[in-house]
Amino acid sequence: MDGHRLRIDPAGTPRATVLFVPPLFEEANRTRRTLVLAMRALAADGFAALLPDLPGQNESLTPLVEVDLARWIEALAAIAAQIDSPLIVASLRGGCLIDHRAKAAAHWRLAPVAGASLLRTLLRARVSADREAGKSSSLENLQAEARNAPLLLAGNRLSPAMIAQLGGAEVQAVAPLRSLPLGSGDGALPGTPLWLRAEPGEDAAMANAIAADIAAWGAACGIS
C-alpha cells in the first residue's frame, strides 16, 4: 500500500477494528466527512476505526488510471490481513463490490450497488458535461471509446480494464453479513444519500446511526 490510512483509536485496548470501505470515485469524497464522524463515534464506544486510501485514491502515489477493481480487491484483502484484533469490514455503496476477499469476523454493508449502475451514472455525467461544453457524446460512443483508451469520467481517468470490470461487477456473498438500505422504512438505516449531493457534506445523525448499527452487529457476531 502506498496511500495514507486514517486511523482513530479508542482510549484503551480496542474491542475490535472497523475497516471502512468507502464508496468509489467521486462518491467517496461526498461521504468522507460523515464516515470520519462515524469513526469517532466508534472510537468513543471502544472500537478502532480505519479508513485507508486504496491505490489511486487521495494520498496514494499510484495514478488512478493504472488501477482496476481487481487491484483494489487485492489491496483491501492485504490491509485486512494485517489487522490482529477482531475485524469488522464496513462497506458503503460501490465499496461493497471490492470487500469480499477481506477476511473478517463480520461484514456490514450499506446501500450496496451494482457496478453497472455506478458506470451508467458516471457515463451520464460525462454526457451532460460534454453537452454543456458544446460537445456531442453518447453512452454508446463513450463505452466504445473506453474499450481502447482511458476515459475521463467525473474527474476520474479510468482505464479500459477498470471500466470493463466495473460494468460487470456484482456484490459478492460474504458471511456473516448485515446489509442495509438507506432511508426511512423498516430495516433501513436513517440518513441522507450524501453521494447524490453536488458537494461534500456531512450528516451527524447518520454517522451516529452507522456507528451504533455496526457496534450492535459486532456484538451479535460475538465481538464483545
Image (tube, rainbow, N blue to C red):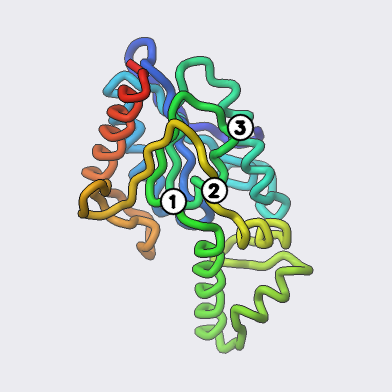
Dot 3 amino acid type: Ala
- Tell me the CA gap for discs 2 and 3: 13 Å
The reply to whether the C-beta atoms of the residues labelled 1 and 2 are less than 8 Å apart is yes
Q: Which mark is residue 112?
A: 1
- Residue placed at 52% from the left, 75% from the top? 124
* Amino acid type, residue under disc 1 in the picture: Pro
Distance in Å between CA atoms under marks 1 and 2? 8 Å
Q: Secondary structure at mark 2?
A: helix
Q: Residue at x 53, y 55 (%)?
A: 25
Q: Which residue is mark 2?
A: 97
Mark 1: secondary structure: loop
Residue 68 is situated, as x and y percent measured from the top left of the image, at 68, 51
What is the number of the mark on residue 161? none
Sequence-first disc among 1 and 3: 3
The quadrant in which residue 109 appears is top left
Q: Residue at x 71, y 59 (%)?
A: 159
How far is mark 1 from mark 3, CA to CA? Answer: 19 Å
Mark 2 Cα shell of 10 Å, populated few (<14), some (14-19), many (≥20) = many
Image quarter in which the C terminus is found: top left
What is the quadrant of residue 198 in the picture? bottom left
Q: Is residue 137 above or below residue 98?
A: below
**What's the residue at 56%, 72% (across, down)?**
123
Residue 106, horizontal then vertical, whole percent: 43, 28
In the rendered image, is residue 222 in sight? yes
Choose between 217 and 11: the one closer to the eye.
217
Note whether residue 43 is visible: no
Q: Quadrant of the N terminus?
A: top right
Looking at the rendered structure, the number of numbered marks drawn on it comes to 3
The vertical placement of 93 against 17, above or below, is below
Q: Is residue 29 above or below residue 88?
A: below
Q: Which residue is the site of mark 3? A: 77
